[in-house]
Every structure is written in C-alpha cells, then in structure tokens.
Amino acid sequence: MSNGRAPDRSRRSERSRQAILEATRALISEVGYRKVSIEAIATRAGVGKQTIYRWWPSKGAVIFDAFLALSDAGGEGGLALPDTGDLEADLKLVMRATVAEFADPAFEKPIRALNAEIVNDPDLAAQYREQLARPVDDAKRARLRSAQRAGQLAADADLDLVLEVLYAPLFQRWLHRTGPLNAEYADSLVDITLKAFRP
Amino acid sequence: MSNGRAPDRSRRSERSRQAILEATRALISEVGYRKVSIEAIATRAGVGKQTIYRWWPSKGAVIFDAFLALSDAGGEGGLALPDTGDLEADLKLVMRATVAEFADPAFEKPIRALNAEIVNDPDLAAQYREQLARPVDDAKRARLRSAQRAGQLAADADLDLVLEVLYAPLFQRWLHRTGPLNAEYADSLVDITLKAFRP
Amino acid sequence: MSNGRAPDRSRRSERSRQAILEATRALISEVGYRKVSIEAIATRAGVGKQTIYRWWPSKGAVIFDAFLALSDAGGEGGLALPDTGDLEADLKLVMRATVAEFADPAFEKPIRALNAEIVNDPDLAAQYREQLARPVDDAKRARLRSAQRAGQLAADADLDLVLEVLYAPLFQRWLHRTGPLNAEYADSLVDITLKAFRP
Amino acid sequence: MSNGRAPDRSRRSERSRQAILEATRALISEVGYRKVSIEAIATRAGVGKQTIYRWWPSKGAVIFDAFLALSDAGGEGGLALPDTGDLEADLKLVMRATVAEFADPAFEKPIRALNAEIVNDPDLAAQYREQLARPVDDAKRARLRSAQRAGQLAADADLDLVLEVLYAPLFQRWLHRTGPLNAEYADSLVDITLKAFRP
DNA sequence: GAGTAAACGAGACGGTACGTCAGGTCTTTCC
DNA sequence: GGAAAGACCTGACGTACCGTCTCGTTTACTC
C-alpha cells in the first residue's frame, strides 16, 4: 500500500554519495552552517536534489554523515588511547590534543554545525552518541579500566562520570566560549579528575 | 551620514514588546524551535513584522529576550544561594533543583532553542554569558567563597573551574541526552566536586 | 557567466499558465486593477509566486497576457472587417460595435488596467502595438485599401492617419471620460473621417 | 460626533505645500512614476507624512497638483490663442508647439504619470478636465468660433468634435508611441481637420 | 505678552505586498 | 530503475510603503 518504497541500496551511486558529503563539508567550512542549504549542496555536488532526499531524511543527517566521514577517514577499527602505565601523562596528552582540536578553526565550524542540529533533534543526538561518541568513549573507558586495574583510579569509580568530569567542562567552555582553551586548562582538568577519583 | 537611523527608544510600545516576547515563548513551547518564524511571532502577537525587525537584530535575539524575560521574572536584585554553613547540603539542594528544572518540559524547549542559537552566534553567546549566566554564577561563586573561608574548600581553588566541574557534566548530559538526570546524579556531582576541591 | 539561467520552456506547466491568466482576468474584473497583486493572483490560481516570477517580468506583462488570451480566444487567423462595398455603412457598423465594447463594464476594467500599465512601460506598449493592435489595424487597413480601389477614399490618403482620425477621438473620450459614447458619436466620427479623406 | 475635524485652511503652511509639490515633480522626473511614493515625497520635502495626508486624498491628487503648479506657473488669466485671421496658420502654430511640448522629456514623464493615475481614477479625471483641460479647450473653442464667424469653418460644426479630431490623434500617438511626433504630423492634422469641417 | 489650538516634523505602529530563497515533491529525460 | 535536471507549491525571509496614530515643537491667533 505504501508508495514510500525503500530505495535499493545496491543501486546507490557511490560517486554521488561522496560528492554530496564532500560538498557538504566544503560548504560548512566556507560559508558557515547557517547558509548551508540542500539546494547549495546539490548544485555544488552536481547532483539532483532528489538524490539527497532519497538517501537522507534531513539536512542534519547529511551534515552528520559528512562529519562522520571526516572523522573516521583515518581508521575504523581498533581506536585506542596510549597506555604507558602513567595515567596522568597519558590523559594530559589526550586532553591537550582534544583542546587543540577544538581550537582548530577548520574543525570548529563543522562541530558547531553538528551540535546546533543535535540540540533539537533527539534522533540525531542518538546517532551521534552511537556512531561518533561511542567509539571514542569506549577507547577512553578501556584506558580508565586499565588504570583501575593498576590501582591509579578508584575501583568503584563510575567511568561514565569520570569521562563527564574530564570532558564536559572543556565542552561547555568551548560551546559557550566562557574561557580560554589551552594546555594549562587541559592539565587542570586531568589533575582535578584524578584527585576526585583517586582510590 | 548613515541612513540606518537608530529607532527612538522612548517611543517604543511596551505593549507590543510584551506581546512579542509572550508569543515567542508560547510558540517555542507549542511548535518547537524549528518552526518558530518571525512571521508566526508577528501574527500571534498581533504585531507588524517591522516592529520586530525594528527592535531585534535576529530571531536568536528575540528568543533570547523571551527567555530572559521568563528567567528574571522572579526577582532582579540579590540573587543568593542558601548558606546554612553545610556546603554539601546546600549544593545538593541547588543541584537537585537544577536537575529538576532541566527535566521540566516547559523549560526544556526554550533552553534548547536558545542553545541552538548560541552555538553559532558568538554575539548571542556573549549576551548569554553576561545577562543570563553571570548573575547566577556570581551567586554561586559567593557561596563557594563563603565555603573557602569556612575551610570547606581549598583556599586556592579556581572557583570558575569548580563551577564547571559541578555543572558542565549535568549540562552536557542534558544537551546530548547521554544519561538520566535525577537527584542521585545531582548528589554524585556534588560529592565528586567536593572531593576534587577539598582543602 | 550569468547565474540567471533561462527557464526551460518545454517543461512549463500549461495548467499553471492557464490558471494564472484566468485568475488575473477574474481579479481585474472583481476587485479592480489597483488591488490586483501578484500575491493575490498566485493564491487565486493555486500557484506559487515563483511560478509567476519565473515566466513574467512584471505585473503589467501578466495583465497583458491575460488580456491577450481573452482577445484572440475567438480566432487567430483571418481577422477581417465586413466589406459590402459600402464603406460608410461598413465603418459605422464597426465603430458602433467598438463603442459598445468600450461601454461594456466587463471590458472596461481590463482595458483601463492595461492602459495604465502601457502608459509608463515602453516595452509593454510595444508588445501592445505588435500583438493586440496590429492584427486589428491590419484588418482595418485592408478594408480601407479596398475602399481606395473603389474610389471611395483618396488614393493618396495615409491609412494610418485615417485610422487615427477615426479611432483616436473615441479612445481619448473614453480614456478621459470627456463625453458620451454612443451610436450617434460613432456615426459622427465616420462621417467626419470620410469627409476628410474623400477623393 | 465625528472626530475627523476638517483641517484649517488658513493655518496651512505654504512652505510645506511648495516643498511637497517640488519634491513630487523632482521625483517623477528622476526616478520615474513607478517609484514615487508618499514616503519618498515626505522625506525629500522634509515634511511629515501626515502633512501630505492632511491635504491630499491620494497620491494621484498630489501628482495632479504638482503638474497643475507646473502648468499654470506662467499665467492664470486670459489664456488665448493667436488670432491672425488665418485659421490654418494659427492652428499649425499651436499644434507644432503642442507636438514640441509632448516631445520634451521634461514634460513627458509628469504627463505620463498623470495619465496613469487618471485612467483608473474617475475623480481625478474630472479634476483634470475641469482644471487642466478646460481652460486650454476654452481658448481653443474661442479661436474656432472666431473662425466660424469668418466663414472658415462650418457654422454648424460641433467644436468639441473638432477639437477631438485635431488633438486626439496626437494624444493617442504619444500615449501608445505609435508614430513620430513632428511638425509635419502637426500640419497634417490641421489640414485634415480643416478639410473635414470646412463650410 | 501669555495662553492656546492647530499644523507641523518625526516616526512607531499594524498591515499588505514585494521579489527572493529554500524546502520538499513531482515529472521528465537520459543512461 | 537510478540519477540529473529542474518546474512546481509552500512558506518564510527581510524590505518598502501604506495610511493611522501619537509624540513633542513651532507658529499664529486670541485674550
């Protein structure tokens, strides 16, 4: 009865898909999130609008996929954090890298665009948690569990809470632009977190 | 020289201003942020579109003002947190209230709408910091200073950092919907924070 | 170089075109020229405004086309005036019909609307001359040439001038409402013209 | 009962009246009839909009007055046509002057603007007949009556008709831009008219 | 001269329409 | 049958003016 038949994935043009994601990325960087339109993406990608609507349910979804493609361009599989045995040093390394990433103008615009979509779209938020945040968080949790085994972290610490204490201040400061993002700040967060969750 | 002459504030219609803010609030709650349009606000408020454009530079600014009017409807002056001498009890009280507020559907939509605007609009973010966040943060900092004097908090603790560790996890969890917001969570954050910053 | 790509004529929706012209005609008759707006035409025709702007450059052009469709609804081809051999009788017949047409309220409003546009729009005036006036004038000139051959009109008479003397007084009287339009007046104009241009 | 008290003519500011008419004239010449707005006139004249609405019922009326002021700037009283005794010569003189006037770009725009208003506004048309056309036509009729007395024109000729045959072709040709306006054309119209109405 | 009433400039107001842009749907044409 | 192209309807954008309605501020006429 439903006319809304699902498109046949096997016939999908990989060429068009790539062109769309590439165009989306370029447009977000160039003109900013506000001015990115499906129309502009289609034109830039040399693609019919219908080709976008056929495969993505919303503009947010396209942006999300564009961002996803950008993120895991490197490697899918065994994402892992350094584990030298020195938790403090390892975390500071990672946090400094994160701070630098957030400060990088090339990354900033897309991440802001994505967050603007996520705030008001629960589905997209779920997708974000599953596909973007989870792999990274899993890696972080693995490193923390290793620290717990080494007695550097309270054995009963709620690792999700540890991650939140570690990352949320940074995220909020970046989102609301309430303060500078630099290496000292990264180090402070690690120090505080370790103090809060030490055995 | 400039033709863009500034509107005469003294002639401004308070009646229209109120109607616009009220209509904005109602629309955000009813139809959601995405579907709030200047056109809809004007119609609902019984106001010409130009009256909105005359006094606000962007849709975000209207939403911000609507939210501002909602927030400080209660009281302008001496916003203060409870100070019973027991920092832990006082903070848990406040944090539980904050958690409840975030969970209240009536508050949720406008706050999300506002955050969506803030993410991509630095000016609006600054306005948010100054007019909405600052007064509240000042009150919180005052309570924390009192705790420092009472020896319940490290004397050299960076109070901005304390606030971030206390609130940012809650904020992030709410924004990204990564976990439940309840009294236990509120208490955990207080416990963690006090442990991290105790003398 | 120009982004303003020309619309593809072959894809044009005939259905929309007809609806627009019909709505225009109806609106002119009902509410009067002054209140005919693109917006109203679009709504009435159940059409997007863009569809009008895509195919017509100005409101005047739409009105013109609506009028054109009305005029040659009858027949394209062999428009011809009666030729009984009696020039005076034939012209009086035609002039009386013309007078009646101008006096018909159903015709009056659209013609006035069209003239209001023509006065200040040279392009539209040219279009009027070519597409509306010319076919009719050609038929008239043919009849006059026949009369010249029959010796009822000076052989060297400037036929354009004859037409002007015959019709312009009627047109001006109608446009400025300077006097009554009736059969007597029509006859007078024929008498005068024949006297002025007799061999 | 009515609050709409009539304005007190005696208190009217002549300075504002002049400024408005001057601004109207200037705007019609500069930006064209289409873009002349009450708002623009008020701004240009350094006058409040209400001052215009207080004294004129419509944009057409302002344009009419501006044109009126332009026309009879020269002289109010005994407008009279030359009467040398030679009707043909006198008429050709007048008609050539009229042709020149219509061809003058400085006159053309305002006259077109005025006609655009008149076409759809019967009140304005009446005002036009009474205040602009009548004085001139009276003078012309006086000259024609003199010619009748001199036996140069049929004694029973309808002078209004004579005027129409003389002027309407010129007017129509100018309005619809159907042909050149020059001295030869002026002469032709006089010749034709005299032939049509000779005794 | 002081008092006052009306016209004045200014411009905010509720509106209508403008002409443009983008959203998402539908149709046509090609491959 | 997917994909490009693009016309279509919808609806919001931000601007220009409409005609009305206060605001203070001249201006000019009473008293």
Image (cartoon, coloured by chain):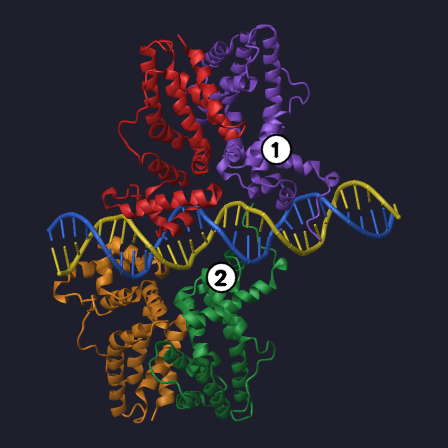
Chain colours: A orange, B green, C red, D purple, E blue, F yellow
Percent x, y for residue A9?
15, 66
- Residue A195 visible in this rendered orientation of the protein: yes
Dividing the picture into quadrants, the one containing residue C128 is top left
Q: Is residue C76 above or below residue B198?
A: above
* Left or right: residue A187 compared with residue A62: right
- Which kind of residue does numbered mark 1 sit on? Asp
- Which kind of residue does numbered mark 2 sit on? Thr
Of residues C195 and C68, the one drawn nearer to the viewer in this rendering: C195
Of residues B50 and D117, the one drawn nearer to the viewer in this rendering: D117
* Left or right: residue D147 compared with residue B171: right
Q: Which residue does the image show at 28% across and 74% down from the upper left?
A: A128
Q: Which mark is residue B43?
A: 2
**Label 2 SS:** helix
Chain of the residue displaying label 2: B
Of residues F5 and A173, the one drawn nearer to the viewer in this rendering: F5
Which quadrant, please, contains the N terminus of chain C? Answer: top left
Evaluate whether label 2 is on the same chain as label 1.
Answer: no
Percent x, y for residue B124?
47, 65
Which quadrant, please, contains the C terminus of chain C? Answer: top left
Dividing the picture into quadrants, the one containing residue A190 is bottom left
Q: Is residue A106 above or below residue D185?
A: below
Count how many numbered circles sit on residues in the image.
2
* Left or right: residue D130 compared with residue B39: right
Q: Mark 1 — residue? A: D65
Percent x, y for residue E15?
52, 55
- Residue A180 visible in this rendered orientation of the protein: no
